[in-house]
Image: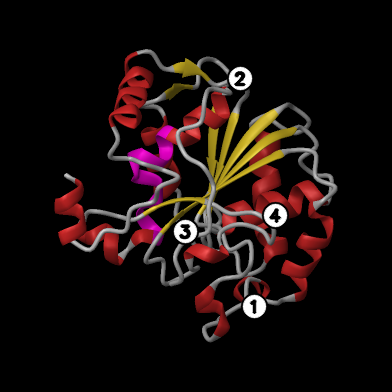
Amino acid sequence: MRNLRERMGIIRNPGFDVDSAGFRAAAVAMRNCPGVLPHPLVVICGYHSPAAPGWIALATLRRFAGTGEHGTIVVSYPSCTSKEAAADRILRALDRAGMIGRSIDVMGISMGGIMARWLAARGELPGIQRLVTLASPHRGAKIARSVRPDAAARDLRPGSDFIGALDADFAGRRYELFCYATLRDWLVGARNTAPVGMSPVWVDPTRPLAKVMSHFTIGSDWRIMADVATRLLGRPKLGTPSDPPRD
């Protein structure tokens, strides 16, 4: 298997050995006996994204961790052109679901992870316990260096005042943060998917479509979602954060 992957040009991550017998056995064990998440789960989608990627990520996660009776919601804001409008949409969805002030875990996809950080820094997610981010531009998005069609995109460019303010507030956070990346992410860049001083857990896509569209398919990667389940369930981790290869 490893020789085949090497011939296909797939980069192996020693800190997340998804081909090992131990990884496979742990994933199978979780699928056969999934734990129940300890808090309601809020999935926040990305920049101009419909809700579908959030539901796909949630369905993949449910292969390894049940949500029980705590409840889950998926929030999207496809028409919002600014972070302020997106924040309003997210908070209204949380309020309708009765999750304001409750202990919650959040899974943010792309910009969704940055919105969760911003809302937490503003004190509007007081109950957030764990934040999992998938391909989120914690250090800015590569594409936003040159393509910035609206205020939300301008705030996501590397070195923006918004990213700087989030970094300034980061040390005072009260939640755990777990970051994930896939290589070949031409929108964000794998090295941008964790705040300065942190590294993501990362994998290299294997499917042809995922190699081209890795940013958009990260939520359907069962290897990543298996490790996400361990973080949310408090079980032994499958992957170790490390710096991805340069994009």
Q: Earlier in the sequence, mark 1 or mark 4?
A: 4
Magenta segment's dominant SS is helix
| Residue at 45% over, 45% down | 15
Q: In this picture, is 46 found above or below 159?
A: above
Residue 154: mark: 1
Q: Which residue is mark 2?
A: 38
Q: Earlier in the sequence, mark 1 or mark 3?
A: 3
Q: Which residue is mark 4?
A: 87
Give the CA separation, mark 4 to mark 2. 25 Å
| Residue at 67% over, 30% down | 104
Can you tell which of label 1 and label 3 is closer to the viewer? 1
Can you tell which of label 4 and label 2 is closer to the viewer? 2
Crowding around mark 2 (Cα neighbors within 10 Å: few <14, some 14 to 19, many 20+) is some
Can you tell which of label 3 and label 2 is closer to the viewer? 2
Q: Which residue is mark 3?
A: 49
Can you tell which of label 1 and label 4 is closer to the viewer? 1
| Residue at 50% over, 28% down | 230
Q: In this picture, is 105 found above or below 182?
A: above
Give the CA separation, mark 1 to mark 3. 17 Å
Total marks shown come to 4
Give the CA separation, mark 2 to mark 1. 36 Å
Image-quadrant location for residue 162: bottom right
Give the CA separation, mark 1 to mark 4. 16 Å
**Residue type at numbered disc 1:** Arg
**Residue type at numbered disc 3:** Ser
- Label 1's element? helix
Q: Earlier in the sequence, mark 2 or mark 1?
A: 2
Q: Earlier in the sequence, mark 4 or mark 2?
A: 2
Can you tell which of label 2 and label 1 is closer to the viewer? 2
- Label 2's element? loop
Q: Which residues are magenta?
A: 215-226
